[in-house]
Amino acid sequence: MDVWSSLMDGFATALTPMNLLYAVIGVLLGTAVGVLPGLGPAMTVALLLPVTQVLEPTSAFIMFAGIYYGGMYGGSTTSILLNTPGESSSVITAIEGNKMAKAGRAAQALATAAIGSFVAGTIGTALLAMFAPIVVQFAVSLGSPSYFAIMVLALLAVTAVLGSSRLRGFSALGLGLAIGLVGAGSGQARLTFGIPLLTDGIDIVVVAVAIFALGEALWVAAHLRRTPLHAIPVGQPWMGKSDWKRSWKPWLRGTAFGFPFGALPAGGAEIPTFLSYVTEKRLSKHPEEFGHGAIEGVAGPEAANNASAAGTLTPMLALGLPTNATAAVMLAAFTGYGIQPGPQLFASQGPLVWALIASLFIGNFLLLIINLPLAPLWAKLLQLPRPYLYAGILFFATLGAYSVNLQAFDLVLLLVFGALGFMMRRFGLPVLPLILGVILGPRLEDQLRKALKLSGGDPLGPNGLFGEPIAVVVYIIVAIILVWPLLFKLYRRARPAAVSMPATSMPATRSGASEPQEAGGAVSHGSHRADGNPGGDGGDGDG
Amino acid sequence: MSSIASGLKGRAELGVALLLGVVGVVVFLDTSRLAITYSQTDPVGPKTLPYLVSGLLIVCAVLLAIDVLRGGQGEAEGGEDVDLTHPADWKTVLPLAGAFIANILLIDWAGWVISGTILFWGSAWALGSRHYVRDGIISVALSVLTFYGFYLGLGIHLPAGVLKGIL
């Protein structure tokens, strides 16, 4: 029908030779960079933002689509061959994947990850194409009060639900909002300190590159492993008949977990990958293999990971709300082209959006045919000497940030925010709330202004912030998210025996350090970097 | 980790609380000097959001300070190449920052090819590479390639600096 013909138009755009070339470049770059230790998909997109500003928007987004899925797949390759997940979303994949690799089944682990990613990515993208227009239909009927409420929800959910400490999440959010205030966007010069170069605000590209690339490179440099990890060599990935038999159901179940969680604000990939792992362990005919390299434990979580990546794009495209770091940076790219994200996007930029969705399908397919034969090559990338890798990140980060405005001043900002990124990694402040604060802060203010203009400046009036039923519902959800940990704490205090915890860690619970819903995902600094040892992240699932 | 080291770590995190507090106060002071121009078209005004943000930052600063004093700790972030068992290695980070600052100072005057070469070579050296010649060749090659790549491929003219006329 309508969706179908739009999608076909999208394919027609995406399949022109030039755009197909961009898709291939995107997939190759995304995978290569995703495989490289220390580089996640968000950082890849951030580094390439300046370069793509000179491309046509359609071509740029086709490339981003490739980078997005490529980065995901590359990350899982790293976690299987190195046993240290590069992204929080591949923590679970690493548990069984690396055990399989150590047992000489790296080829099968990579194959089930690649094919599972393809299956989940394709189904997820199809669901995206189906649901996004429905969400848009619903969203265009919303007024500013509801839209404002939904933006508040997205910000608070990402801040309060993801990450191990809510307090540190809110600290990062505050810093991000403060950075977003800089400039004269509101009609008054705010936080410019008399520096004319700050009048236009701080370029989001500079902030993103600084926090993701520079902060990360400095952080790794400070703690560089003396002896690099040993990567397990691998040949051409392939699967036997029994591997297929054991993989296909986990792929589908993982997809079912991943997509809805990805589509929710703050759903993320950690929870669905964990749920998928636990489910596969329970349903498996070979539960004894779990912990020693069960293929279901790779197939399910990897599918969940990719389906959630597709799910994330639903609120991003339909509502203009990014819920993970990569989507946030892609949204920054939209604004860089002067494209207004939000429910009107499908109407105003229909061909662009559908070309993006079509190239997600194409990128997924390209990933499958490119990555299966190239896996041994990707594995070789893991041997890149670390001085060159991190010097290269610094080099390209500098180049990217400088080329936006050709101002050395931007490099000063880059260094300042890079230092901030370093500090945040050092003290466990999550990166995602900061980036979302920078991006959504100004739009939040804009929406608030629109809403109050309609109500004549009365926030509580009949046309005010609570004037629409949807807005009220959303605020109730916000309240539940905020109050939930307190209730949980009271419950636990009432039954201290239920959870035995060392006395010293009690103050830490104040900041939500150990809520059970977070224990599984364990992590998620928005930069897609994982903490800790995957084996210790509740992956044993003995509960 | 020894108790002394963890004590130090606890105190270091107070710096984060301090930073949050300072930013909060700066936002507050900056906002309070704005002249209000109330108008029907902008009932929110330029002050509302900054005040909220400064409030959030100051509250977070206080709570974080309390949390740290009560023994709370942020988890340092891990990663493939990250080894958290040894403390931060400032002998790597400071020269790295030095190479970066050298690039900032040199880029407009000496041009990207020279400053970029210094940036890459210096960073690789700071990170422990001791193949001086190979590093040099890679640095020059990267800088020259990106210069021409941006010039020809993207139409972005990076500064040529003192090499103007040669490049």
Image: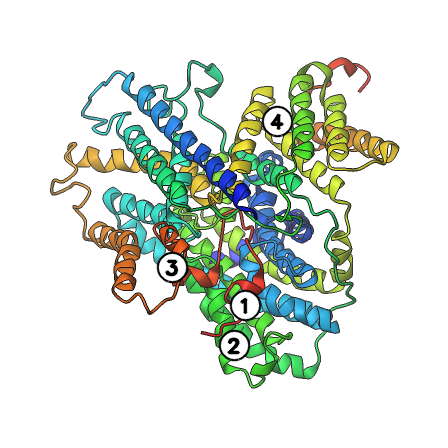
- Marking on residue A280: 2
Q: Are marks 3 and 1 in contact (CB under 8 Å)?
A: no
- Residue under circle 4? A402
Measure the C-alpha gap from mark 4 to mark 2: 48 Å
Left or right: residue A299 versus residue A264 is right
Whether discs 4 and 3 lie on one chain: the answer is yes
State the residue at coordinates (48%, 58%): A522
Q: Mark 2 lies on which chain?
A: A
Dot 3: element: loop
What is the quadrant of the C terminus of chain A in the image? bottom left
- Quarter holding the N terminus of chain A is bottom left
Q: Name the residue under label 3.
A: A515
Q: Badge 3 sits on which subunit? A: A
Label 3 vs 2, first from the N-terminus: 2
Q: Which of marks 3 and 1 is in front?
A: 3
Cα separation between marks 1 and 4: 39 Å
**Residue B142's quadrant in the figure?**
top right
The kind of residue tagged 4 is Tyr
Tell which circle, 2 or 1, labels the residue nearer the N-terminal end.
2
Query: Can the viewer see residue A130?
Result: no
Mark 4 or mark 2: name the one nearer the start of the chain: 2
Is B45 located above or below residue A446 in the figure? above
Q: What residue type is labelled 3?
A: Glu
Q: Which of A168 and A372 is in front in this view?
A: A168
